[in-house]
Amino acid sequence: MSFRDEFELLLRACYPVIYVPTQEEERVEAAIAQSAKQLGGRAVYIWDFVEGYQGNLNDAGFGRRNPLQALELVEKLPATAPAIFILRDFHRFLEDVAIARKLRNLARLLKSQPKNLVLLSPQLTIPDELTETITVQEFPLPQAIEIRTEIERLLGSLGQTLPSRTLDELVRSCQGLSLERIRRVLARAIATHSEIRPEDVELILQEKRQTIRQTQILDFYPATEQISDIGGLDNLKDWLLRRGGAFSERARQYGLPYPRGLLLIGIQGTGKSLTAKAIAHHWHLPLLRLDVGRLFGGLVGESEARTRQMIQVAEALSPCILWIDEIDKAFAGLEGKGDSGTASRVFGTFITWLAEKTSPVFVVATANNIQSLPPEMLRKGRFDEIFFVGLPSQEERRAIFNVHLSRLRPHNLKTYEVDRLAYETPDFSGAEIEQAIIEAMHIGFSQDRDFTTDDILEAASQIVPLAQTAKEQIQFLQEWAAAGKARLASKHSSLSDRIQRQLQGPE
């Protein structure tokens, strides 16, 4: 159901106070004006703190700098006169006891009158005493059809046409931006070269990065890593490669649903974050990184509003990859958090969205500590698959050494004894292997020569791997995965060999 359809339904059902959290004030007011016209020409009154009521000569300036007086106008109009009162930035006054009481009194009155109050605000903050009085309606970012109409309008004013493919690319790149930002960035393109060009997609992407940064919740993350940069993890890579075309129109015609996401659980430094970046690069999708800690705000209702904003932005930018790193730290110990249930409500909103989303947002969540994850996160339906990423086997360590040395020393790769390196680094993670190579480079550089196999082994001998410092935790993770709780990301890991021996039984 569109915003207008739902809004008109609320008006007909006599919902007295409707709260619309949005940054797009001009666009939502235009939509409300269209709804008012559709419902028999209802009068629309717009108030803000500085100018008072606007647009009506009889009441111009009424309620200036007086929000309580602004509410009193509702009672002054005839009871049978249909009207919509738009109150801008009214969230700032809801904590006032007089305002809250007046709103509750008006709510009783308006149940029997064709009048509605609409509170517009860039953020959602509702005091507890008004939760039963106020109805929240989300105002979505512009959809593809609305963006296309706006671009075609601008092209028409320029007397310009664009090929259908170029127009589609422009529309897709604009998704996730407000209409005002789209107009602004296209105006910048027109001011630069007097027309809209295919290369203006880069300008739009810059504006999109700026918008995402301003949310202070999501980061637009550049993904340059490739699937080939991942050493080992063959089962996981095969799974990803099979789904490479799952976001295409051909997949929709075939009847395939959009992939939902992955939960990668395992030991630190084994390539979970690298996998998220490689997925985005291989599937040619934008990568959004969510820091779950940023969802939590100090004001009542702010955390829930930020969660909804994150979901709205991610869905508007779809198809995309949403990367949530170390999700176990964000939602650990929900029952014991003394935050009046804020973390539980945020978690509930998030996992409900995971289970019910139909938009092509592929969620890649990583976790190191399975004991910290709420059981609801592991239930089937949240993610397409849960993979366990364990310590690399000797064969996988060989592949990891090859990846790093091929990047750092492609011309003399053969001078390094990769088999020896893999054999001499048992229980090393991918991150520890990379650190050993970096330390070897420091050794060689300090002696004004290239680093050697012996330098890498010397550096490795000075590293105490996590497999030793966190032995109990890693053993618990391996036993959890061995019990069949997750799919193994590697075909040749030490854990997969152990499971195979268990399945074969004693000789």
Image (tube, helix red, strand yellow):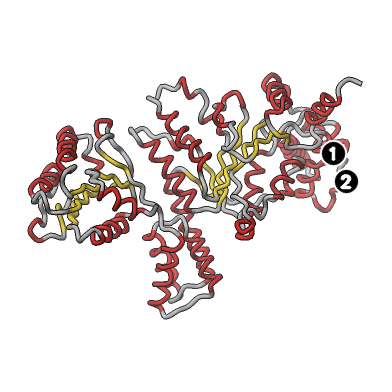
* Quadrant of residue 301 within the rendered picture: top left
Q: Residues within 10 Å of mark 1 (few under 14, many from 20)?
A: some
At label 1, which amino acid type do we have? Thr
In the depicted view, which residue is nearer to us: 13 or 102?
Answer: 13
In the picture, measured across the screen, residue 287 lies left or right of residue 121, that is right
Q: Position of residue 97 (x, y in %)?
A: 17, 32
Task: Name the outermost residue toward the right.
Answer: 507
- Residue 122's place in the image compared with 162, above or below, is above
- Considering depth in this image, is 131 or 42 the residue closer to the camera? 42
Q: Position of residue 120 (x, y in %)?
A: 27, 48
Left or right for 248, reference 156: right
Residue 415's disc number: 2
Determine if residue 446 is in view.
no
The residue lying furthest to the bottom in this view is: 159
Q: Quadrant of residue 500?
A: top right
- Report x, y in % for residue 232: 77, 41
Please name the amino acid that badge 2 sits on.
Thr
Name the residue that disc number 1 marks.
453
Identify the element where label 1 is drawn. helix
Vertical placement of residue 457 versus 184, above or below: above
Please tell me which residue is depicted at 76% across the width and 45% down the height of the picture.
Answer: 404
Residue 440: numbered disc: none
- Mark 1 or 2, nearer chain start: 2
Quarter of the image with the C terminus in it: top right
The reply to whether discs 1 and 2 touch (Cβ–Cβ < 8 Å) is: yes
Tell me residue 235's x, y (percent). 75, 41
Q: What residue is shown at x 24% (from left), y 31% (from top)?
A: 129
**Which residue sits at x=68%, y=28%?**
485
Instruction: Specify few, some or many for label 2: CA neighbours under 10 Å numbering under 14, 14-19, or 20 or more.
Output: few
| 211 on left or right of 123 | right
Is residue 498 in view?
Answer: yes
